[in-house]
Image (tube, grey):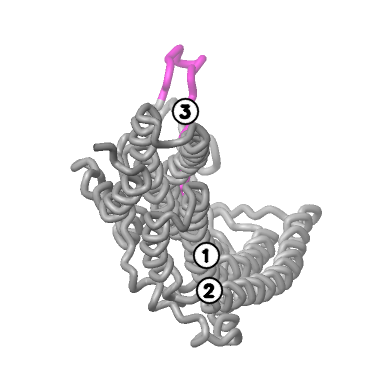
C-alpha cells in the first residue's frame, strides 16, 4: 500500500514540531551554561584590562608614599691622596695628615612636601575614576554582547530545527519521487529552501562565534569552551521604562558618570599642580655641618653652612603658565563633557522609549497564536486546501516572525543597557 504524500508530510511535520525540544536535550554534556550574573562575576574577577588598570591605581597610590618621603641627607668626605713631605699616601695623622667631612640636609620650603602629597592624592582619584570608567564601558559591552549572543543563539536553534525537519522531509520526498507520488518541482522547492536556510544559518553561526569570542575574552573563559547562554524570562518582564523619568536619568548621570568625575578631578589635579609649580618657584635651603682636620683655621675646624639659590632669573614661570593653561583647558573640557552627557542621556532615553512603544504594540500572544496557526495550516495541508509551496511559504514566514521577534527583544534589552551606560548607574538590572 502506497502512503499518500500529503498525509506523509503532515505526519512528518507534526512529529518535527513536537520534537523541537530534542535539540536542547542533545547538547553536549561539557557545554557551559552561563547566566548574565555569572558572566559579570567572571568579568570582574578575570578581565585582564580591569586587572591592568587596577595595577595603575596601585601605582598611583605608591606616588603618595614617595611624596611623603623626606630628602636624604648627603654625606661627603675628602682626604689627601699623597703627602709630599712625609712621602706617604692617605696621611690622616693629626700631625701631618689632612681630611675633611661634611653632612648636609635639604629643607624644602613653601610647603612643597604637603603640596606634592595633595597632588599625588589627586592622582589616585584620577586613576580610580579611569578604572571606574573602564569598568562602565566594559560592563556595557559585556551585557550588550550577552543579550545579542543570547538572542542569536535562540535564532540559531530555530534554524537547526527547521533545517533538520526539512532535511527529513527532503529525504522522505525523494523516496516518494521514486514511487511517483510527488513532482520533481516540489523536490527542487524543498532543496532550495534547505540550501537557503543552511547559508543563513552558517552566516549566523559565524557571527555567534565572533560574539562568543568577545564574551570569552572579557570573562577569561577558555577559547575551546562551548557556552550556552541562559536568561531568566523575568528579565524581559521586569524591565519597565515608563516608570523612569528623563530628569531622574539626567541627575543620575551627573552624579554617577565616572568620565564626568574624571574630568572634574582632572581640573582638581591641574589646580594642585599649579600649587606645586608655584611652590617650586620658592628656593629650598640646604644646611650643612663641616669638619676639617687641618685645612682651615683653626685646626679641627667645625663649621655650620647654609646655601640657597637666588631666584633672580628662573622662577619657574613656564611651568606655572602651563599649569594655569591646564586648568582652563580642563574647564572647557568639562563643559563639553556635560553637554555630551546631556545629549547621550536624551538620545538613549528617546531610543529606549521608541523601542519600548514598538515592543508594546506587538501582540504578546502573537508567537503563541502563530504556533497554534501552524497546526491549522497542517490540517489544511492534509485536506489539500494548501499546496506544498504555500505550506513552505508559511513555514518561512514563521521563521521570519521568530527572527524579528528575537531581534526586537535584543533591541529592547540593549536599550536599557544603554541607559545604564549613559547614566553610569544600574537603573535597570
Horizontal side of 343 relative to 215 (left or right) equals: right
Left-right relation of 256 to 40: right
Q: Secondary structure at mark 3?
A: strand
- Label 2: which secondary element: helix
Tell me whether the residue at label 1 lies in contact with that at label 2, contact meaning CB atoms closer than 8 angstroms: yes
**Which residue is rendered at x = 33% and y = 62% of the image?**
231
Q: Residue furthest left?
A: 29
N-term mark: 3 or 2: 3
Measure the C-alpha gap from mark 3 to mark 1. Answer: 87 Å
Instruction: Inspect the magenta stretch and tell me whether residue 71 lies in it.
Output: yes
Magenta residues span: 70-91
Q: Which residue is mark 1?
A: 408
Residue closer to the observer: 155 or 165:
165
Number of other residues with Cα within 10 Å of mark 1, as a class: few under 14, some 14 to 19, many 20 or more: some
Viewer-side label of 3, 2: 2
Q: Which mark is residue 79?
A: 3
Q: Which residue is mark 2?
A: 359
**Image depth: mark 3 or mark 1 in front:** 1
Amino acid at each position: 500500500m502506497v502512503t499518500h504524500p500529503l498525509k506523509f508530510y503532515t505526519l512528518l511535520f507534526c512529529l518535527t514540531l513536537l520534537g523541537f525540544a530534542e535539540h536542547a536535550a542533545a547538547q553536549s554534556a561539557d557545554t557551559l551554561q552561563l547566566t548574565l550574573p555569572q558572566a559579570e562575576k567572571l568579568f570582574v574577577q578575570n578581565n585582564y584590562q580591569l586587572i591592568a588598570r587596577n595595577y595603575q591605581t596601585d601605582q598611583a597610590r605608591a606616588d603618595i608614599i614617595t611624596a611623603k618621603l623626606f630628602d636624604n641627607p648627603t654625606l661627603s668626605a675628602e682626604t689627601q691622596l699623597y703627602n709630599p713631605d712625609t712621602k706617604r699616601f692617605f696621611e690622616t695623622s693629626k700631625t701631618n695628615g689632612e681630611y675633611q667631612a661634611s653632612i648636609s640636609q635639604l629643607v624644602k620650603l613653601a610647603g612643597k612636601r604637603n603640596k606634592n602629597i595633595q597632588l599625588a592624592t589627586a592622582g589616585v582619584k584620577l586613576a580610580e575614576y579611569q578604572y571606574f570608567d573602564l569598568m562602565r564601558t566594559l560592563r556595557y559591552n559585556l551585557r550588550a554582547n550577552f543579550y545579542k549572543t543570547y538572542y542569536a543563539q535562540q535564532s540559531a536553534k530555530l534554524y537547526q530545527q527547521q533545517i533538520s525537519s526539512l532535511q527529513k522531509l527532503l529525504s522522505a520526498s525523494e523516496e516518494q519521487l521514486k514511487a511517483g507520488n510527488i513532482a520533481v518541482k516540489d523536490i527542487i522547492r524543498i532543496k532550495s529552501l534547505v540550501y537557503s536556510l543552511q547559508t543563513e544559518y552558517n552566516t549566523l553561526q559565524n557571527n555567534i562565534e565572533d560574539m562568543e569570542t568577545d564574551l570569552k575574552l572579557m570573562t577569561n573563559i577558555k577559547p575551546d569552551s562551548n557556552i550556552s547562554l541562559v536568561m531568566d524570562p523575568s528579565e524581559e518582564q521586569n524591565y519597565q521604562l515608563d516608570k523612569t523619568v528623563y530628569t531622574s536619568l539626567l541627575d543620575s548621570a551627573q552624579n554617577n558618570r565616572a568620565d564626568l568625575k574624571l574630568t572634574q578631578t582632572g581640573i582638581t589635579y591641574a589646580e594642585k599642580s599649579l600649587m606645586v609649580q608655584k611652590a617650586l618657584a620658592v628656593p629650598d635651603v640646604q644646611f650643612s655641618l663641616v669638619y676639617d682636620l687641618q685645612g682651615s683655621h683653626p685646626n679641627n675646624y667645625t663649621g655650620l653652612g647654609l646655601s640657597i639659590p637666588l631666584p633672580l632669573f628662573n622662577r619657574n614661570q613656564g611651568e606655572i603658565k602651563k599649569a594655569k593653561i591646564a586648568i582652563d583647558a580642563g574647564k572647557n573640557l568639562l563643559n563639553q563633557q556635560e553637554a555630551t552627557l546631556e545629549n547621550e542621556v536624551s538620545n538613549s532615553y528617546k531610543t529606549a522609549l521608541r523601542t519600548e512603544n514598538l515592543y508594546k504594540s506587538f501582540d504578546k500572544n502573537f508567537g503563541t497564536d502563530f504556533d497554534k496557526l501552524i497546526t491549522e495550516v497542517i490540517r489544511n495541508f492534509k485536506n489539500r486546501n494548501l499546496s506544498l509551496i504555500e505550506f513552505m511559504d508559511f513555514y518561512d514566514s514563521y521563521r521570519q516572525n521568530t527572527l524579528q521577534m528575537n531581534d526586537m527583544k535584543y533591541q529592547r534589552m540593549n536599550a536599557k543597557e544603554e541607559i545604564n551606560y549613559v547614566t553610569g548607574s544600574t537603573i535597570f538590572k
